[in-house]
Amino acid sequence: MDPMKNVAVFEDSARAFIELLERITPAQWELPGLGVWTVRSLAGHTSRAITTVSEYLSNPAPGPAECPDAETYLLGTSSGQRSNDAIAARGVAAGNSLTEAPGASLTQQLDRVLASIAAQPVRRVVSVHGGRTIPLAEYLRTRNFELVVHTMDLSKATGIPHTLPTRSVADAASLAARVASRQGSGDTLLLALTGRIPLPEGFSVV
């Protein structure tokens, strides 16, 4: 775990997301985004990758981390319908809360988040949704994953090219591969990446 690198990658991805957000036209906000989400709801959900960090850092530091790393965090994320419905609802609410100038507003929030992160001890632990505790540096890896994947989703939905840095995409792809390996599907993923087989229909690590 390299806390400084994780912060830098998170910042790069957040700024790339905000840059794309600023280029969305008024006519595009209600286009289909992802699943039940419009572009607005998808953008709102993605913005939570920034705002939740601030929210969790505003709470007192909990005890030791029960969740040691980002891989364990993603493996423990519930995929049940009730959980999916709650995530969808939070995305809609966050999208409805976006201001008329969401890029400027989120840039200010990001700057505050980065200042708050800089003031934390290196081994700061945060308590996240559901009561799980995880090192801040590892939680930022999960936020980078969200920012990268959903910025790509927004790019696909709007036709606006994204500007995600290579290292942000590489970090997210590496995390996905590690999760796949822990799930027991690492062989399948590696064979697909090397052109041996196609990925099974519906294959996903989340």
Image: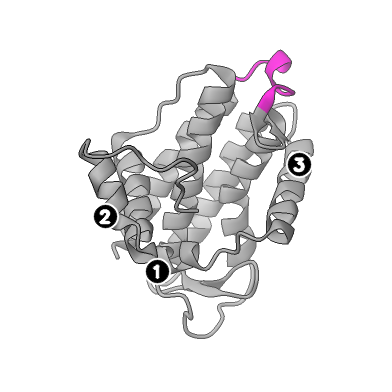
Q: Is 25 within the magenta?
A: yes
Residue 158 position by quadrant: top right
Residue occupied by mark 2:
187
**Helix, strand or loop status at disc 2:** helix
State which tag comes first along the sequence, 3 or 2.
3
Q: CA distance from mark 1 to mark 2?
A: 22 Å
Residue 43 appears left or right of 193: right
Asked if the residue under mark 2 is in contact with the one under mark 3, i.e. CB atoms within 8 Å, the reply is no
Q: Which mark is residue 80?
A: none
* Residue type beneath disc 1: Asp
Q: CA distance from mark 3 to mark 1?
A: 28 Å
Q: Residue at x 44, y 60 (%)?
A: 118
Residue 52 position by quadrant: bottom right
State which tag comes first along the sequence, 1 or 2.
1
Of 54 and 184, the residue lying toward us = 184
Q: Main secondary structure of the magenta part?
A: loop
* Residue type beneath disc 2: Asp
Q: Position of residue 78 (x, y in %)?
A: 60, 64
Q: Position of residue 142 (x, y in %)?
A: 46, 56
Q: Which residues are magenta?
A: 23-32
Q: What colour scheme has been applied to the protein in the rendered image?
A: one colour
Q: CA distance from mark 3 to mark 2?
A: 36 Å
Relative height, residue 9 to residue 195 (above, below): below
Residue occupied by mark 1:
69
* Residue type beneath disc 3: Val
**Helix, strand or loop status at disc 1:** loop
Camera-side mark, 1 or 2: 2
Residue occupied by mark 3:
92
